[in-house]
Image: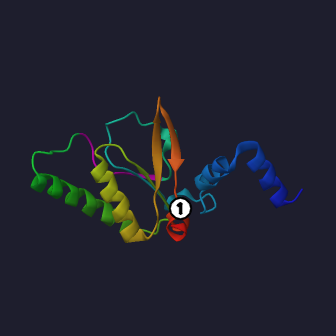
Amino acid sequence: MSDKDILRLLVNRNGAEWITRELNRIDTSAGDRSHTLTIISNVGIHPLPSEILQGEVFLASEGNLDFSSMNVIASQYADILTRLSQKLKSQEWTNIYILPFGHCTLSMQIKLLVYRVTRIEAKEIFHLGGGKYDILAIDQRPIINNA
């Protein structure tokens, strides 16, 4: 049976979305997890099962942030993004995952910073509820090209 036959069989059995999801889970660094980073935008918001974390874990923030004014928010975000930028520049990364807990604007800033520093499109660890998680990785290039 050829590789194409195996792939067709898997697509027929599980669907194309399943194949895409499973391929996105594969670490392209051939098992070397030392170049994989998981960024948790805010620790302490949700339960954190260790089995969903990939490679090295970076805690961007923890607990409640102070949202008393835009200046305070901007200052806290700048501190978080500065520390993250230093981490991203500390070595070469092949895979980056973001666990977007906490305020969505912080996770948005983190995702943008990851791309601007590394040119890697980070994958999200998506909380499905009920203690379940999955990887969300959307390749936007075909969407952009087909628009």
**Is label 1 in a helix, a strand or a loop?**
loop
* On screen, residue 110 above or below 144: above
24 sits to left or right of 72? right
Residue drawn where x is 48% and y is 39% of the image: 50
Q: Nearer the viewer, residue 65 or 19?
A: 19
The residue identified by callout 1 is 139
Q: Residues within 10 Å of mark 1 (few under 14, many from 20)?
A: few
Q: What is the residue that sits farthest to the front in this orientation?
A: 147
Quadrant (top left/top right/bottom left/bottom right) for the N terminus:
bottom right
| Horizontal and vertical percent position of residue 71 | 10, 56
Image coloring type: rainbow
Any part of residue 30 in sight: yes
Count the numbered circles shown: 1
- Indicate the amino acid at tag 1: Asp
59 in magenta: yes
* On screen, residue 112 above or below 57: below
Any part of residue 60 in sight: no
Residue drawn where x is 32% and y is 36% of the image: 45
100 sits to left or right of 78? right
117 in magenta: no
| Horizontal and vertical percent position of residue 19 | 67, 51
| Horizontal and vertical percent position of residue 32 | 58, 59
Residue drawn where x is 33% and y is 49% of the image: 41
Magenta highlight range: 56-63
| Horizontal and vertical percent position of residue 139 | 53, 61
Q: What is the residue that sits farthest to the top in this orientation?
A: 130
Residue 114 location, quadrant:
bottom left
Q: Nearer the viewer, residue 50 or 74?
A: 74
